[in-house]
Image (tube, coloured by chain):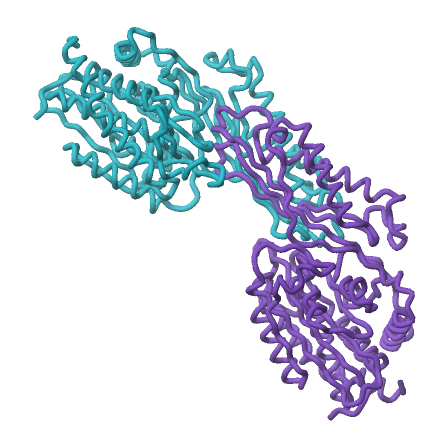
Chain colours: A purple, B cyan
């Protein structure tokens, strides 16, 4: 790429950065928790259409995807789950095509009184924008859009197909990204600006979600006997799951990219509900568990071990011996994915292009690598569509927590690097 | 009492027993969980008025009772809390007056799929009536009404004031019974037909309810560190509370009426809620605890010890050290009460009258005594109104549990014994 166009692209991002912050604030103001993404998606669809992209907006149908590899089980229908894709169709087709993917769904805000300001009223303080989803990952979605804007401001567009995807369900199943694959969207590479501190993600974990349901005979507390309490019966099960977590994190079990990491696989009791009345011995509880697995670790084998661990612990408990725990899967059935294991020329080239873009924006500083202890939608492209998926996004803090915030300087750099990456990967042609 | 009237009273209960079952079924069909007692109370008020009682129906006002001994703290107002009292005013006043008390509120049904039939669609199978509240304690309320009916059917009424009380809030505070005291209802004795197997309750425990709130900094599960999980942080607190429970049950701590009982004081984790999302480390949880105390055990001292136990346990936990548990009291602040310690002549006489009534119904079998490991509204009469309070009601099973049921043969016997007790205690006069 010649130095002049590179300089003009970087300047174009700077020139439009106030608008980009505005766009991010508006998108973050949509409280797009799971099931409530419609207004955010309508906003995205309108913005993509304004930019001349061909917009495809559709409701996910479980029947279309439930037999595909990578599908995660869900409860209920997807009546409220809309995906949006904006397609750029070039005049020429001399370059390599690209998917710019991001998710619009955000995790729940949690108790509002733990936020310094309302989670869906984004505010800027210094270089930070605060708000649920500002970092994870609306800043990334916005960077995708404004990277293309910067090119257009320079009078050029990608010389290959580019699909800007705004998907739902990333935070619980990934079925939004899967539905994009099923709908036929394919490209030579995918870029997902998840907020991992401007580093390139070389490997990500798999994630399994499961729910444990305990039910049994309760009583008036006056007659409470040892072990009759469904809430307390969960405690030894949780302990047994943590022992399993320790085993799975053992040095001999680790994937190479996580060899240095003592505790990459986190088991999280994320939600717990049980009982109805202080003076009734609780007859039921339900708790939600998230467990990580390494790339290459088989999901069905992992599930079988989880079930055996729970069965074994249940045998040692008075309440549970007579009330076997029920295990329900809904949510993540996500395999791990390691870009580092993709030895294809395309992967090498895509990584090289991103290295170059990052260095150009950062005064020659090398693009750092990172193995992350979470999952992203990258797995769908990498594992099920033979498409190298590069996860590279801005710096954010307190994602999934209170006072989530994203570093706007970082958003600007990622937007610039994304624009340069597109220019390099797709090539450029004159805007129509 | 002469043998003829006694026989006629017993027969009158038998003669109306089908109606009594009908009445019980209709009352049980009202789903009178806390806050939802209005229709049940309207039914009770109408039934008492139909019988010529002077009906007083009023909304409890916290301001009226909050400074009285025995008050339990509540959250919110009592906009929906109605008490009903039906007063019998005799022509003569030669006998001793009586309060016939019962509560109309019932505890939540819990998961409906654990019931063999819907909890608020009472059904009779053999000698049992099934339904939430059928035993605890709508059968008792109904026995009070039909005992008076039996007298009237014999052409007589009590020769002293009798107050039939249908109160709310027994299952969480007792503030319904307290409001009856505050409103001025007083008598020479009180009878409360709580479902304790046709035994006379000599002592009941006190009960304290408290809520423990944990809140702290959460994170994306990818970064979960040891001890950062608010749900799991509750586990050592629960363990510490159980250690306290063991201490309080120690042989040297026991009230005389419970000397034989290894574990009269039950600590119950009755409700637990925490977290919002499987893949977010939970930032909060709340759990509801019920703890028993012995008669004579001071509530403020007990609360101070509970708080110290929680504080101490919190100091040993990574999460809790930086996020001190908050303890909120709402619900029972109930002292224990021992009728066995009431050495007054009135108490002796009332117990004697009930002994006689029970024996007359049960072929001379003595009335058994029982120290119960729960609380009842009896404490208000006994502790704060110098009124011996006799708890004596039918046999029920699975109260506060699934498939709660009451023994209808037992309800018949208790109704008969109650009628004889009224006749003896209050004396009789010709119906007007």
Given residues B416 and B326, the one toward you in this image is B416
Q: Does A222 sit left or right of B238 as displayed? A: left
Count of labels in the image: 0
Q: Quadrant of the C terminus of chain B?
A: top left
Q: Residue at 89% x, 75% y: name it.
A: A356
* Whole-percent x, y for residue A30 in the image: 58, 69
Q: Look at the image and tell me whether residue B324 can be seen.
A: no
Q: Residue at 64% x, 43% y: name it.
A: A327
Residue A194, placed above or below residue B311:
below
Q: Quadrant of the N terminus of chain B?
A: top left
Q: Residue at 76% x, 69% y: name it.
A: A193
Q: Does A172 sit left or right of A366 as displayed? A: left
Residue B147, placed above or below residue A51:
above
Residue A200, placed above or below residue B209:
below
* Whole-percent x, y for residue B225 in the image: 75, 47
Q: Look at the image and tell me whether residue B137 can be seen.
A: yes
Q: Residue at 67% x, 86% y: name it.
A: A52
Among the 4 quarters of the image, the one containing residue A251? top right
């Amino acid at each position: 790429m010649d130095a002049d166009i590179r300089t003009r692209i970087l300047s174009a991002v700077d020139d439009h950065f106030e608008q980009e912050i505005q766009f991010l604030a508006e998108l973050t103001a949509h409280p797009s928790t799971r099931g409530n993404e419609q207004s955010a998606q309508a906003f995205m669809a309108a913005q993509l259409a304004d930019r001349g992209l061909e917009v495809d907006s559709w409701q996910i149908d479980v029947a279309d995807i439930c037999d595909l590899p990578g599908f995660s089980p869900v409860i209920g229908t997807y009546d409220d789950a809309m995906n949006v894709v904006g397609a750029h169709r070039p005049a020429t087709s001399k370059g390599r095509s690209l998917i710019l993917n991001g998710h619009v769904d955000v995790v729940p805000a949690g108790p509002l009184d733990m936020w310094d300001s309302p989670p869906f009223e984004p505010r800027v303080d210094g270089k930070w924008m605060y708000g649920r989803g500002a970092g994870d990952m609306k800043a990334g979605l916005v960077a995708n859009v404004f990277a293309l804007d910067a090119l257009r401001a320079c009078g050029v567009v990608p010389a290959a197909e580019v699909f800007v995807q705004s998907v739902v369900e990333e935070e619980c199943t990934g079925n939004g990204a899967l539905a994009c694959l099923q709908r036929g969207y394919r490209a030579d590479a995918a870029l997902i600006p998840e907020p991992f501190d401007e580093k390139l993600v070389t490997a990500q974990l798999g994630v399994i979600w499961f729910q444990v349901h305990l039910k049994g005979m309760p009583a008036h507390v006056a007659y409470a006997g040892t072990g009759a309490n469904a809430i307390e019966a969960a405690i030894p099960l949780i302990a047994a799951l943590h022992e399993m977590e320790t085993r799975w994190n053992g040095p001999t079990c680790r994937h190479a990219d996580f060899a240095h990491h003592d505790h990459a696989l986190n088991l999280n009791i994320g939600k717990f509900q049980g009982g109805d009345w202080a003076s009734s011995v609780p007859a039921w509880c339900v708790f939600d568990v998230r467990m990580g697995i390494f790339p290459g670790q088989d999901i069905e084998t992992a599930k079988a071990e989880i079930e055996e661990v729970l069965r074994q612990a249940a045998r040692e408990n008075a309440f549970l011996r007579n009330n076997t725990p029920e295990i329900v899967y809904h949510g993540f059935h996500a395999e791990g994915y390691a870009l580092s294991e993709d030895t294809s020329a395309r992967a090498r080239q895509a990584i090289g292009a991103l290295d170059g873009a990052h260095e150009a924006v950062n005064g020659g500083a090398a693009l750092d690598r990172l193995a992350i202890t979470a999952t992203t939608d990258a797995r769908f492209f990498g594992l099920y569509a033979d498409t190298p998926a590069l996860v590279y996004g801005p710096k954010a803090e307190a994602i999934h927590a209170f006072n989530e915030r994203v570093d706007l300087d970082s958003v600007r750099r990622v937007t610039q690097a994304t624009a340069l990456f597109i220019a390099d990967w797709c090539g450029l042609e004159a805007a129509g």
